[in-house]
Image (spheres, coloured by chain):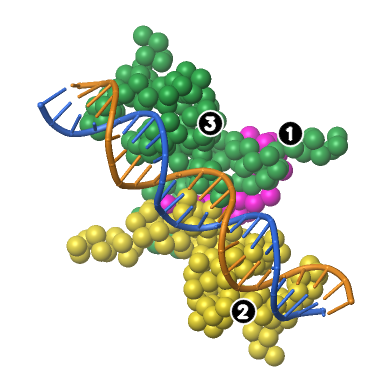
Chain colours: A yellow, B green, C orange, D blue
Amino acid sequence: MTSQDNELDKIRKLCDQAGMKLTPQRLEIFKELLSHEDHPSAELIFTKLRERLPTISLDTVYRTLASFDELGIIKKLNISNARTLFDTNIEQHHHFICTKCKRVEDIHWPDFDKANLPESVSALGSIQTRHLELHGICNQCLNKKNKG
Amino acid sequence: MTSQDNELDKIRKLCDQAGMKLTPQRLEIFKELLSHEDHPSAELIFTKLRERLPTISLDTVYRTLASFDELGIIKKLNISNARTLFDTNIEQHHHFICTKCKRVEDIHWPDFDKANLPESVSALGSIQTRHLELHGICNQCLNKKNKG
DNA sequence: GTTAATGCAAACGGTTTGCAGGGGT
DNA sequence: ACCCCTGCAAACCGTTTGCATTAAC
């Protein structure tokens, strides 16, 4: 059994548990998501899928991504005011955002994930997730700047 | 000289330096911002201002808030997919967001602000700002839950 | 067969823009 | 007098929704 088969089994189960039908569209959207290590937008998924599924519509992609977000398969990212991005990696991690090229890169910082919050912060309520956004200029853009 | 006079001096200077005219609308928007400790939306500022300046338009508010953001007087917040919020506090701080009532509260955590980033992270580029978002349920919502 | 999902098109809502008139410097 | 800024209205764009049809179970 390949790793993809495993993943397809996973989506089959998840849909089943949620009472959702496993339609070809959902399967293909899921497979498309698997092929993205980065943070695709709904529109990008749609455009890519159209090559294989010429009749799929953008609203189906939106609806499916919303369902997948609810199922916890992916995570909506509200990084800028522009289009919503979807995080295909649901493990605890953070993001570095280049203010020049808008690239979003995953960051792992387990020590910070484990660090205790200050009393003044934990007193605010029940804190469930922590998400750090680092903003700056990525190496690629720094290099361009130096050359140009 | 009152603290407000100081602030009005500040906006006068900032506009001057930026080659922007200090119009009554800009002045009133600035004063309105001063009276908000929280994270108002453009629409809220607009609604409040209309009581005093019945002819002001929403697009002027948007344009002015964008200018103020560029001047560094306020900061745009991209917290959810919904309306943009503006942070009237530009000191280094973070946010706690209640997933129930969507309240956004300021958090201060100076030790974290000073903490060194891991090598793997600082190697990504030149990091300028760090912004932490804590998501959870605020005490008010927790209390409601227990009572209801 | 039942029920939910799809695709289409149109609506939506926050935000932005073109433009002509008005006000600050 | 100049140019910037304002207010109006309309455009914009990503996203959502209503509806009839279609397909999964």
Which disc, if any, is residue B140?
Answer: 1
Identify the magenta region: A113-135
Q: Earlier in the sequence, mark 3 or mark 1?
A: 3
Q: Residue at x 27, y 64 (%)?
A: A143
Marks 2 and 1 belong to one chain: no
Q: Nearer the viewer, residue B147 or B95?
A: B147
Q: Position of residue B68 (x, y in %)?
A: 37, 34
The CA distance from mark 3 to mark 1 is 23 Å
Which disc, if any, is residue A28?
Answer: 2
Q: Secondary structure at mark 3?
A: helix
Which disc, if any, is residue B44?
Answer: 3
Q: Residue at x 56, y 68 (%)?
A: A58
Q: Nearer the viewer, residue B44 or D2?
A: D2
Give the mark toward the camera: 3 or 1.
3
Q: Which amino acid lies under the numbered mark 1 shown in the image of this protein? A: Gln
Question: In the rendered view, does B35 fall on the left or right side of C3?
Answer: left
Q: Residue at x 49, y 73 (%)?
A: A47
Q: Nearer the viewer, residue B40 or B51?
A: B51
Q: Residue at x 38, y 54 (%)?
A: A99
Most extreme residue toward the top is B1
Asked whether A132 falls inside the magenta stretch, the response is yes
Instruction: Read off the chain for label 1.
Output: B
Q: Is residue A68 above or below residue D3?
A: below
Instruction: Read off the chain for label 3.
Output: B
Q: Which amino acid lies under the numbered mark 3 shown in the image of this protein? A: Leu
Q: Nearer the viewer, residue A83 or A55?
A: A55
Is residue A35 among the parts visible in the rendering? no
Query: Where is residue D6, by image quadrant?
Result: top left
Q: Position of residue A133 (x, y in %)?
A: 49, 52
Q: Quadrant of the N terminus of chain B?
A: top left
Q: Is residue A89 above or below residue B43?
A: below
Question: In the rendered view, does A48 fall on the left or right side of C12?
Answer: left
